[in-house]
Image: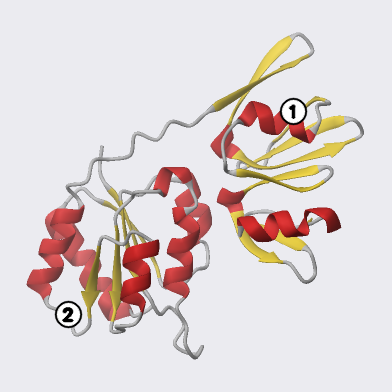
Amino acid sequence: MPKKILILEDNEEMSKFLSELVKKILPDVELFVFPSMTGVYEVVMNTYMDLFLVDVILDKSVPGDTSGIRFVEKIRGVLKYEFTPVIFITSLQDPKFYAFNHLHCYSFIEKPINPGYVEETIRKALRFPSSNFIDPVLFFRRDGLIINIKSSEIVYIESVNHRQHFHLINKKTEVIPYKTCGQILDEIGIGDFIQCSRSTIINRRYVESVDLVNRYVKLVGVNELIAIGITYRSRVEKEF
């Protein structure tokens, strides 16, 4: 199976250089190239990446921008990307200590670029084995039938009219007989799901942004904002 690599780089020339270099190393590679954060989260949640090449600064119009580091912080919170190698592209010195110690960064590509070093760094990073991530499957009984749902496909769960609505990444909604949020969390048994109100559970994998002041969560691919209950605000704050 071809390796899948994501390149997150706002500079077109650098992005082209990295793409060509990766194709030289792995001719059958599947590349996902983005100049900004737009659309990135949805892709990485639906396709497993074997390597990330991430520019630390993705928006030079913002003073002190380190959105590349913020992106890696988020993917490290996703079970399947806990140990996926990340190579940062930067001309900054300060982020190194933080990235190595807190984000388990594999290496840095420093500007100005040394092509030989870059190639060797990518080759070594690709020696990491592909993830053995197992996607837990949830089973529910509905009308005498067994419904199975992969946990990674659940964007959020909400209680409506005494039934639980599972909103999935493919835009489908599975409705099961009522269970409390506590019962569902007990059955899921993994740390990606967070209760953010009395009636709603969200999957951290699909969280795009969190506004604690106005108490809402923006999820990838979901138009409406998900409210954070007053009594759940501190709980959500700890998670993010």
State the residue position of label 2: 113
Instruction: Return the mark for residue 203.
Output: none
For marks 2 and 1, give the CA distance. 53 Å
Residue 43 seen in this snapshot = yes
Judging depth in this view, the residue of 201 and 172 nearest the camera is 201
Hey, what amino acid is under mark 2? Ile
Label 2: few (<14), some or many (≥20) within 10 Å?
some
Please give left or right for residue 65 compared with residue 32 in the image.
right
Is 172 rendered above or below residue 69?
A: above
Please give left or right for residue 41 compared with residue 89 in the image.
right
Please give left or right for residue 26 compared with residue 1 in the image.
left
Q: Of label 2 and label 1, which has the lower sequence position?
A: 2
How many circles with numbers are drawn on the protein? 2
Judging depth in this view, the residue of 202 and 229 nearest the camera is 229
Q: Comparing marks 2 and 1, which lies closer to the viewer?
A: 1
Q: Are marks 2 and 1 in contact (CB under 8 Å)?
A: no
Taking the view exactly as shown, the residue that stands out farthest to the right is 161
Looking at the picture, how far across and down is residue 97, in whole percent?
32, 73
Hey, what amino acid is under mark 1? Gln
Q: Would you identify the image quadrant in which residue 31 lies?
A: bottom left
What secondary structure is found at the residue carrying circle 2?
A: loop
Residue 225 seen in this snapshot = no
Looking at the picture, how far across and down is residue 15, in whole percent?
29, 73
State the residue position of label 1: 183
Looking at the picture, how far across and down is residue 206, in whole percent?
59, 51
Looking at the picture, how far across and down is residue 218, in whole percent?
69, 60
Is 136 rendered above or below residue 102?
A: above
Q: What's the residue at 43%, 62% (across, down)?
A: 72
Q: What's the residue at 83%, 54% (across, down)?
A: 231
